[in-house]
Image: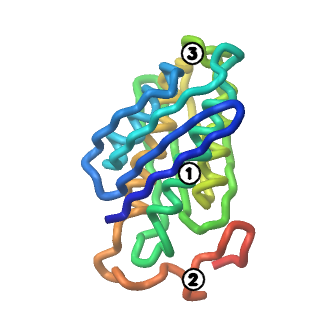
Amino acid sequence: MRSATIERTTRETEISVTIDLDGTGAYEISTGVGFLDHMLEQLSRHGLIDLSIKAKGDTHIDAHHVTEDVGLALGSALAKALGDRVGIRRYGDALIPMDDTLARCALDLSNRPYLVWRVALPQERLGSMETELFREWFQAFAQAGGITLHVEALYGSNTHHIVEACFKALARALRAAVEIDPRAPGAVPSTKGALAGAGGMKS
């Protein structure tokens, strides 16, 4: 079972995440930030990853701490579930249309975190959530998950569609990358024989 549970508690947030990489896309998500819940549901459903996420935090101030810390906790759970990353395809990419929008995601489960974020968001808010926080979520997720992550909105005018297309592209790319490669199920997908730790050697 490629699953893991992470609990993260600070003065600002209290978060519990359970992930199953070989799931069906079932989810139970409550962060206190409605639009973030909606996006995480997309990640679960389109990635065929089962997710349980429960978060409480200082949302009376704003959504920043909950958003970032959920990204960190989910990335940590992903990394734990992947273990030594033996047998995975490692790479994934997806091109997702949503009405006026086209979004692209390419990623490498390299254990070398890096984010390239080329996403322009016309609106400053979606519901109660500041849209600049989506970059913070992707950054935290990539950092804790050990992911080289490139996300682009190639075009689009509706902010809701742009953000949702980015999450769906991430979901599909992640679904491909975490899959066990039937041609090399016991092999590390690297010429070095091991994927680098965060900040480690290239592989």
- Whole-angstrom CA distance, mark 1 to mark 3, is 23 Å
Report x, y in % for residue 187.
Answer: 42, 84
Q: Nearer the viewer, residue 95 or 34?
A: 34
Q: What residue is rendered at 66% in x and 36% in y?
A: 135
In depth, the one of 31 and 130 nearer the eye is 31
Crowding at dot 1, Cα within 10 Å, few <14 / some 14-19 / many 20+, comes out as: many
Neighbours of disc 3 within 10 Å: few (<14), some (14-19), many (20+): some
Report the side of 93 relative to 8 (left or right): left
How far across and down, in percent of the image, does residue 49 sit?
35, 49
Image location (x, y in percent) of residue 169: 45, 43
Q: Earlier in the sequence, mark 2 or mark 1?
A: 1
**Residue contact between numbered discs 3 and 2, judged by CB atoms under 8 Å:** no
* CA distance for labels 2 and 1: 20 Å
- Determine which quarter of the picture holds residue 97: top left
Residue drawn at point x = 59 percent, y = 68 percent = 110
* Residue wearing tag 1: 75
Element type at mark 1: helix
Q: Which residue is mark 2?
A: 194
**The quarter of the displayed image where residue 157 is located:** top right
Q: Dot 2 lies on which element?
A: loop
